[in-house]
Amino acid sequence: MKNETGLRAVAYSRVSTGRQADKELSIPSQNRAAHEHAEKNGWTFVESFSEKGETGRNANRPEFQRMIQQVKEKDRPFDIIIIWDSSRFTRNLEDALTFKGLLKKHGVKLVSITENFDESPIGKLLEHIIDVFNEFYSDLLGESTFRGMKEAATNGKNVGGATPIGYQMDDDRQLVEDSDFAPVIRRIFKLYVEGKGAKGIASTFNREGILTNSGRKWQTQRILNILRNRKYAGMHVWNKGEPDEVCIPDNHPAIIDVDTFNRVQEMLKTNSPSVSHPREVTSQYILSGLIYCKKCGGKMVGSSAKSGAYSYYECSAKLKGGKAVCDAKPVKKELLEREFFRILKLTLFSEENIRLLAKQTNEQLSANKNDMGESIKSCQRTISKLNRERDSLHRKISEGKYRDEDLAPRLRELNEQIQSQEAKLPALQVAQADHKEQTITLPEVVGYVGKLRTLLDSASNSEKKALLRSFVEKVAVNRPEVEISYKLPSPKRNRENSPAESSPYDMKWLPEQDSNLRQSG
């Protein structure tokens, strides 16, 4: 697919079963981003395969299976599948290897909007690492845990999470009022009803020396979270905003009466500015999501002054709670990013790290090949086991021990499982052939690193962001000091991030005073 103009593209979008769906991009936003990505590349957008409430831990998803079935068709209706990120496609490593191999066999390209993987060994290595992390993340969110939590929540039991300020947990794990902080909650609602905004309430408490139950200063978002929390009206809520949300009224003593709570919700709707939908990673702040305030530990976010003429990274805690929370100075965006990339090239792309990357890449390619062989053997063993069970059931029917209708459900289930495994096997074999005898030499790594250097200079912001997230863990700033923490892949560590390697720098180029710095409260 060298000339991709005019190719047909579809979107595959998915959100989780509730545990993390509130942190994920919505299905309409994923589809919108995919449509825009197709238009930008000159592809014809055909349709969307969308699934809400479907786990990525396995491939038993109706829309996913419908899409894969079309991939196998002789006259398939599309050439490209667009996903927001690789975790939307699957969170299971074996499925990732299997179905990506299947797509390749049938000439279908998988494109991630937020991740840029090329066909080089390094690109494949980074893609494989992300697939491993996705499965590890999924394992932490076990399905059985989710079902047990839902059952407990339906019975009004607390199923984890921090006890909200203003309450305590008694011996029966039920919420009861905390005499120290329940009055603070009542005052927050009272002040808001009287017309004081969330930021004003936070400033008032900080000025009066009133701290949170964790001993910290108040922030605007903390006040807003309290005002929206239905627990203060006596409601027990779990899995908020999802189709299987659990909400039990009068579950515990209410600190705020229902009428006052509902009135505050209406006021919040009226006072809240409209929220624009997420875009395709086009933020001009390349370090957003990676950069933190070294002084207080809070995230640093992009801000601007003089109608956008000047751009900065500034401590979010300071923006929310004022100088009483953190007095770290803003840093000019242009200067910080320029020096950051200069240091990155000098350190990460040093000769020592290039040799390390070559060694680790070859180790990973070898591990991939071995893993693929084991996956094929496991698939073959599973098919044999299922066939033996099916044959055994047929014998029992023929011997008159069971009637057909008694074993029909299990036989149907076995047939489906056998078909599923048999469909996987050719794709695994194709994937194994792709990994056979793959190695990379030091000169090749030097060449790829050169391309990475060029990419850091000329790529779009979204490409730079995706690249940085593959090997930068964190950037901590307290001008003029900056500390960069790296994460490098290590195939010897299964399902674990290698410990981040930190490098501190004294960036003298950051001015102590800047006449263009915005004034913030």
Image (tube, rainbow, N blue to C red):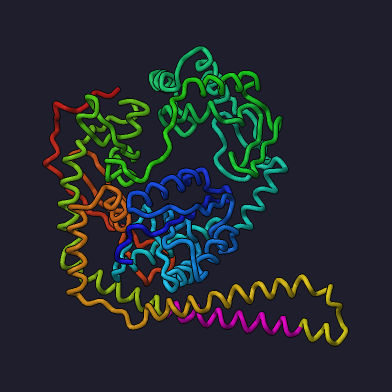
Q: Is residue 32 left or right of residue 68?
A: left
Name the one closer to the observer, 252 or 43.
Answer: 43
Q: Residue at x 23, y 52 (%)?
A: 459
Residue 23 percent location from the top left of the image: 48, 44
Name the one closer to the observer, 494 or 101.
Answer: 101
Q: Residue at x 52, y 78 (%)?
A: 425
Quarter location, residue 420: bottom right
Residue 376 percent location from the top left of the image: 50, 80
Q: Is residue 236 left or right of residue 227?
A: right
Name the one closer to the observer, 158 or 38.
Answer: 38
- Residue stretch in magenta: 370-392
Quarter location, residue 245: top right
Q: Is residue 40 left or right of residue 31?
A: left
Q: Residue at x 31, y 79 (%)?
A: 438
Quarter location, residue 153: top right
Using the image, determine if residue 174 lies above or below residue 143: above
Q: Is residue 380 magenta?
A: yes
Using the image, determine if residue 78 lies above or below residue 73: above
Which SS type dominates the magenta stretch? helix
Residue 97 percent location from the top left of the image: 45, 70
Residue 162 percent location from the top left of the image: 55, 40
Q: Is residue 123 magenta?
A: no
Quadrant of the rendering where the N terminus is positioned: bottom left
Name the one closer to the observer, 41 or 440.
Answer: 41
Quadrant of the rendering where the C terminus is positioned: top left
Q: Is residue 473 visible?
A: no
Using the image, determine if residue 433 lies above or below residue 59: below
Using the image, determine if residue 169 lies above or below residue 62: above
**Residue placed farthest to the top in the image?**
194
Q: Is residue 510 left or right of residue 143?
A: left
Q: How many marks?
A: 0
Q: Is residue 492 visible?
A: yes
